Structure formats: C-alpha cells, structure tokens
C-alpha cells in the first residue's frame, strides 16, 4: 500500500455485445444504409433490445426522411445483431429467428418544422437541435509507446484496448467459450508534472462465458466451480489483459475477473435491457468532458455527433501541435 497515492482516474468500456452497445450498433447500421441511399438523408433512430425466457424483442423508433426507397429496417437490425454474435437464445438472443426474436418498427419522417431549419445548401444549413458539445485531448497516452499519438485519457484508452481485445478473442474464437457481452474498467494513477511513469492499480474484466467453460470446451464438465473460475481468470489474464495492457504499465495491479464469481449464459439482452445512447461516457473520454447527447443513429445534421467529432479533432490538433 502506498502512503501517498497519486490522484486516480477510472474509466470503463464495453464490448459490441453489451446490450447498450448492441443498440448503438443497430442504430448506426440503419444510419449507414440510409446514407448509402441518400447522402443527405435525415436520420434519428433509437433501438431497444430485451430477451425474455428464450425469446427477445428489438424495438426501432425514430425519424427518417430519405430521397429514395427506405431500407429494410428489420433486416438491418437482425443482420447486425447476428453479426455481433446473438444467434442463440441460450446466449441471450437469437436475432436470426423470426420466431424467437420479434422486431417492431416505429419510424416516421422528420418533422417539417425541424427540416425547414435544417435543409438547405452547405452555407445556410442549420443544426437539427441545440446543445453543448465538447472535444477533449491530453498527453496522458504519450508516455507509452504503444499508445502514442492518441492524445487521450490513459484510463479510457486502456479500458478500450481491453474491450477491443475481448471482441477479437470472441470473433476469432481464440477462447471459444467467450460470449459477446463484456466490460472492462481500469484505474490509473498519474503524477502530474513529474517524470514518474503512470501506474495501474486496478483492472476489472467482466466477460460472459459458456456455463461449462474449460480447457477442453465444450467437454469441460469435470471441473469444479472453483477450478472453472481459476481457469477462466487465468485465460483472460493471458489472452486479454496481458495482450492489451502494455507490459511497461503492468506493475502488479489488482486484477478482478467476473467479480461476482462467474458470468455464464444467458447474458446480453436477456440479462439487461439495452438502449441506444446509454454509453456516451464510454464513447467519449471515460469521465472527461462530454456533451449530453448520444452519437449513434444520427446523421451529421445532429450536432450531438458531428460537432463533438469536430471538437475532438480540433482539441487533438491543438494538444499535438
């Protein structure tokens, strides 16, 4: 225990299979297809998902104004959820099945009173709403070679590296018993205005897994629960934490894997309802400056997204110069 601990900063991140991030991905997939049809389309789409006893529902709601045939919203939602890994209700949702997963669509056109202030040429185009947006950059990542060039809060950068690695391990079946739903959290201590390197005090990983995960999965039922927990923790340390966190920063932090003991199926939308826009801190700076509006499912006329992106671009260039 250090007598004088430098100030701490904690940030979390989530995988693409987290219920809220799943909703963000579906909303953005709809936005992408609308913009492919009409680059000037006006899109604001929210998504909700929830699994219930072997079944699930995806609800799409919002406004779309498009010059051309609107895309098949249901198909987009099913394809995106399936591509993330939700093709089995035992895991949390089977988006590929019309019997086991309903898709409800409540999408209308944009209000004419909004569009009359937004539509126009580039010189006179207005914003789709009012709001306060922030861009942020700092030099915390610049002391570590593997992170150099990001100009980002260190705790947020590390937590994002962990969840991206979790996604890779799931997608590439490096650990075939890993499921789509997962989270990370990192606490770092940085001594400002000194040459002392940053120190990580805590790394937390929550990763959904098959109930019978083990070294010979799916034939792993001979393990006790204690042995299974030890095996899962060891594999996550080896394939995720030690892979994602630069070695120079791994100075014996406290590591917590599935802090409740285990995180078996079903997870994802069965364990928690998901909504678009509930992970704006994860999407930005891990607790640093952020606006109040979400990004996903919004075309560039929504300054919640476009102005936040521009402000980040400006902040990064100022700090880097």
Image (tube, rainbow, N blue to C red):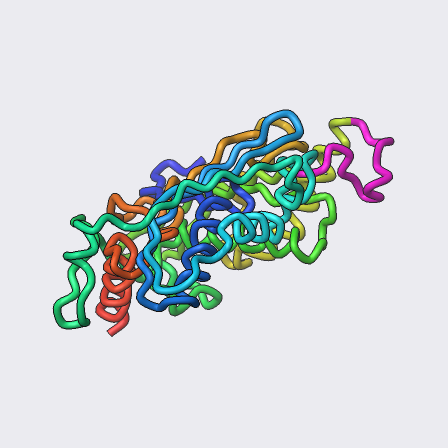
Going 61% across and 37% down the picture, which residue do you hit?
101
Which stretch did the figure color magenta? Answer: 209-224
Residue 256 in percent (x, y) is at 56, 36
Q: Quadrant of residue 106?
A: top left
Residue 83 relative to residue 189: left or right: right
Quadrant in the picture for the N terminus = top left
Q: Is residue 218 magenta?
A: yes
Horizontal placement of 45 versus 16: left or right?
Answer: left
**Magenta stretch encompasses residue 82:** no
- How far from the left and from the top, in percent, is residue 134? 22, 54
Looking at the rendered image, the quarter that the C terminus falls into is bottom left
- Vertical relation: 42 (above or below) 177: below
Residue lying at 18% horizontally and 48% vertically, measured from the top left: 131
Q: Where does residue 193 sit, x and y in percent of width and height?
A: 26, 57
Q: Which secondary structure dominates the residues rendered in magenta? A: loop
Q: Nearer the viewer, residue 252 or 24?
A: 24
Name the outermost residue toward the bottom.
Answer: 321
């Amino acid at each position: 225990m250090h007598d004088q601990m430098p100030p701490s900063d904690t940030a979390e991140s989530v995988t693409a299979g987290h219920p809220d991030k799943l909703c963000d991905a579906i909303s953005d997939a709809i936005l992408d297809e609308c913009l492919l049809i009409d680059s000037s389309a006006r899109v604001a789409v929210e998504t909700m998902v929830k699994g219930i006893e072997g079944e699930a529902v995806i609800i799409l709601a919002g406004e779309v104004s498009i010059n051309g045939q609107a895309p098949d919203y249901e198909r987009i939602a099913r394809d995106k959820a399936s591509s993330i890994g939700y093709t089995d209700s035992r895991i949390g949702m089977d988006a590929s099945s019309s019997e086991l997963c309903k898709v409800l669509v409540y999408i209308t056109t944009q209000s004419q009173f909004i569009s009359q202030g937004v539509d126009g040429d580039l010189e006179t185009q207005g914003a789709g709403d009012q709001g306060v947006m922030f861009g942020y950059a700092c030099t915390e990542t610049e002391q570590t070679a593997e992170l150099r060039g990001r100009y980002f809060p260190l705790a947020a950068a590390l937590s994002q590296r962990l969840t991206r690695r979790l996604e890779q391990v799931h997608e590439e079946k490096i650990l075939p018993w890993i499921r789509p739903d997962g989270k990370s959290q990192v606490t770092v201590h940085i001594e400002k205005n000194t040459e002392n390197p940053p120190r990580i005090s805590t790394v937390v990983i929550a990763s959904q897994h098959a109930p019978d995960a083990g070294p010979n999965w799916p034939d792993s039922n001979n393990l006790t629960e204690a042995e299974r927990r030890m095996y899962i923790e060891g594999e996550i340390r080896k394939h995720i934490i030690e892979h994602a966190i630069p070695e120079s920063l791994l100075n014996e932090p406290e590591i917590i894997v599935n802090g409740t003991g285990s995180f078996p199926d079903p997870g994802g939308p069965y364990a928690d309802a998901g909504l678009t826009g509930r992970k704006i801190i994860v999407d930005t700076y891990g607790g640093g400056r952020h606006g109040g509006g979400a990004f996903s499912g919004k075309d560039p006329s929504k300054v919640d997204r476009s102005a936040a992106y521009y402000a980040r671009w400006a902040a990064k260039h100022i700090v880097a110069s």
